[in-house]
Structure formats: C-alpha cells, structure tokens
Image: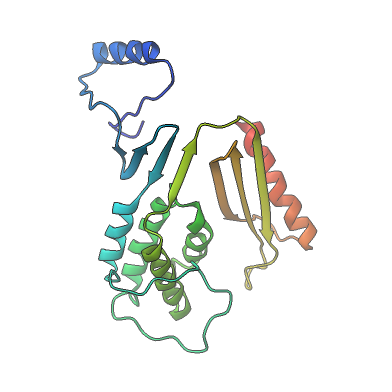
Amino acid sequence: MYVNDILITGNNQDAINEILAQLNKRFMMKHLGQANEFLDIKIDHGSNQYFLSQQKYAQHILQQANVTNCNPLANPTSTKLPATFKEDPVLNNPAIYHRTTGSLQYLTLARPDIAYSVNLLFKHMHNPLPQHFYLLKRLLKYIKGTLAYGIPITKTNLFLKSFSDADWAGDPISRKSTTGYCSFLGETIISWTVKKQHTVSRSSTESEYRALAALTSEYYLD
C-alpha cells in the first residue's frame, strides 16, 4: 500500500475476494482488475513468472537529463576516472544533479544492478564536482542501453540464499567501507542494499564481517 494505491496479491482467490469485500464496506474504492502497472513499475505476466520493470520511468529520467540520444555503455560506473572532464551544458548543474540522482534512487526498486552507482552519486549530493557529473552521465548512458532490464519473479523453490561484500576503505576521505548484499528466494532476488558502514574498519576482513552481520541482522530483525 502506498498512500491511496493498494496492490493485493496471493494464491487464494477466495481470501482476496473477502479482503476486497471488507475494504469496500469501509472505504470508497475502485477495483482496477489485474495489475499491469503499479507506481511506475510495469508488471508483465507470463505462464509461470512475472517480470517487473521501470522502462517508462527510466526513459523519463533520460528525457529530463537531455541524454536520450547518448551512446549506451556496458558498465554503470568507472573504476578509473579520466584526467580531464568535458563539461556538459545540462548535467553540470547542481540542481539537475540533485533531481536526477533522486529520481535514480526510485529506479533502483526494479534495478538492483545500479544500486551501487546511485549510492556513489548520493554521497556527493551536497557538493557535486566535475567527476561526479561525469559518473552521473556514465550511469545514464548505461541505463540507456539497459532500459528493458528488470526483476524476473519465477515459480521456484523457497531456498533462501544471500551474498554480501564490502569495499574496504572505499571512501578516501572518511576511510569508511561500503556494504553491499543481496538475497534470493529460489531464483528470485527479494532484497538488496548498498550503504556506507557507520564506523571505520581496520582491515578488509573486518569490513567483510560488518557486511555479513548487516545482512544476517536483516532477517533476524524482520
């Protein structure tokens, strides 16, 4: 449920009908039938799977940033920055940087592949520099070439498996590491997170353990 939009799903149609009947007694509601789109997330139906994507929303971001005609790239970020940066007449504007990066955060709902890159951009919202404008444009070029990417939800086993990693002392100023982890239920990804660790890790092993602890606590707390 988000504000006044409600999505009800399940494998028991009688239970769903009962919930709808109870809600209709208390609230004025409109039943829109089978969900094909919810909060800018497109839901494609298959025989044994669903596919969640945000292609239309991603295209809107590219249009706002005026990069719809850019050449696509195969990688969302860069591990080695160039010596000089070519100024972009649109993106080299802090206001545009703030708005575009904020929009990209919502895009990560169905695009876990850009979560790290968006997190990297968010670290510099207060004072974006030329290298950050460069990284933003690079990410937008990657999105241009991967508009059809999304999350497949397939009928599979209920075996839970998770992966965690850490970028030790990745922040050159604070020396804090970045935690990253994701979890799959069967073959379907169900959660993912990229965030800076709260304290400085004194070794790569310590940063890895912190990432693993954060991942483990997510399920114990839930």
Task: Judge from the rendering whether residue 66 lies leftward or rightward of residue 118; answer left or right.
Answer: left
Name the image quarter holding the N terminus.
Answer: top left
**210 or 83, which lies in front?**
83
Quarter of image, res 21: top left
Direction bottom: furthest residue? 84
Question: Is the image coloured rainbow, by chain, by secondary structure, or in one colour?
Answer: rainbow
Q: Where is residue 65 in the image (x, y as percent from the top left)?
A: 29, 68
Residue at the (32%, 29%) spot, across then down: 6
Name the quadrant of the C terminus.
top right
Residue 26 vertical position relative to residue 107 in the rendered view, above or below: above
Image-based side of 13 in relation to 155, left or right: left
Viewer-side residue, 185 vs 104:
185
> Is 50 on the left or on the right of 201, as rendered?
left
Instruction: Classify residue 157 by image quadrant.
Output: top right
**Residue drawn at (58%, 74%) of the image:** 79
Image coords of residue 103 (percent x, y)? 35, 56
The answer to which quarter of the image holds residue 128 is bottom left
The percent coordinates of residue 68 (x first, y second) are 28, 69
Up/down of 126 relative to 163, above or below: below
Residue at figure coordinates x 29%, y 36% from the top left: 36
